[in-house]
Image (cartoon, grey):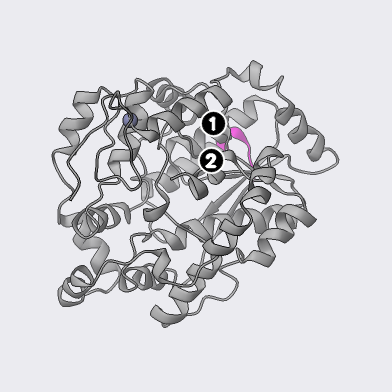
Amino acid sequence: MKDYQICKKCVCDSSVSNVSFNSDGICNYCKIHDKYNKIFPPLKVFEFKKKRIFNQIKKAGKKRKYDIVIGVSGGRDSIYSLYLTKKMGLRPLAVHFDNGWVSDIAKKNIQSAVKKLKIDLKVLHFPKILSLYKACLFASVPDVCLPCSIGVGSSLYQVALKEKVKFINIAISFRTEGINPLKENYCDGRYFNYIMKNFSKDNIVNFNKMNLINYFNYIFIHRIKLIQLPYYLKYNNNEIDKILKNELGWVSGGRHHFDCEFKPLSSFIKWKKFHFDDRRICYSAQVRENQMKREDAIKKLSIHPSMNDKVLNCLRKLNITQKEFDKIMSMQPKSFLDYPNYYSLISQFKPLFKILSKFNLLPESIYEKLFKV
Ligand SMILES: [Zn+2]
């Protein structure tokens, strides 16, 4: 077992996959964060409007009803993306993928934002979606949010295709949630399909539109570009919260991502079974961005995710008995590498992915995640 070490700058420690430390005790995730800050210096809205990417979005939207499709969960980052695009004079279409775990607060936040900003909203529901989460638990993988990752990607590309929109936005950022290690956050269409076929009784038709052929169709034939607006913009959580509360009546759901009611169970499983606290990556990002004090993050992380009422509610909702859950927790931990996936294929095309990221067809962050962490 390797000696315990924690980064002197953030709170990434030896428990984080693929972590390494330089001679000054600074981790490789801090290094990637610094690199992103150079590539994506935090801009004000008027500065972003002078960027080439902004003009590309405007130009692609000409003669169309919408300029950009924005994925919304009801949380701070996605609602702020909606707010910003409207402020920039863009015509966004909001798309909400209902993963079956959306809190009432998040639902109200979405409704209130689209109403006040006068933005069209499309909501995608999938009956029986909960069985997909159950399948991930029985597959014994840490990527328990796989159905949501596939569902969000699939929904945004499908709507963009239908509405002939050339840009989609997923509001995630290295500044707020950090750089997630690949091992605990892998997602691809083949991996998803295998797990669903082997561990779920329900086959949801038209759910997964993220296989390789679909994906190449989106980016090469229809040239739909995925961007992450929060990468470009100046970001201060407290200031954003104030703006959203005052102007849109937005209400915070508590901890980051807690607009999703599956989060207590996913955090508990990741910690108890995979010995990985998913808050560590997020807090590290916030420490680097001076949004949280390092000592406060360490203090919060000393209290581990536990089996509380929220976790029990998730199990009840999934119809998982205590006996079944004990079985899930005692199963040998696996990863995406134990199942068929596209990763080896993707690895062979590393130079192609580099080119795609250069031309904004694939966010730099996805390239970095696939090949660096
Ligand atoms: Zn660090």
Residue beneath the point at 37% across and 73% down = 135
The quadrant in which residue 162 appears is bottom right
Of all residues, the one furthest to the right in this rendering is 63
Q: Position of residue 216 (x, y in %)?
A: 70, 59
Res. 365 mark: 2
Q: Position of residue 184 (x, y in %)?
A: 36, 54
* Residue 254 in view in this figure: no
Res. 231 mark: 1
Highlighted magenta segment, given as a residue range: 115-120
* 337 lies left or right of 64: left
Element under disc 1 = helix
Crowding at dot 2, Cα within 10 Å, few <14 / some 14-19 / many 20+, comes out as some
Height in image: 135 above or below 23?
Answer: below
The quadrant in which residue 245 appears is top left
Q: In the rendered view of the protein, which quadrant contains the C terminus?
A: top left
* 156 lies left or right of 145: right
Residue beneath the point at 38% across and 55% down = 183
Quarter for ligand 1?
top left
Q: Position of residue 163 (x, y in %)?
A: 74, 53
The amino acid at mark 2 is Ser
* Residue 130 in view in this figure: yes
Task: Work out whether mark 2 precedes mark 1 in sequence or the reverse, and give the earlier one.
Answer: 1
The amino acid at mark 1 is Tyr
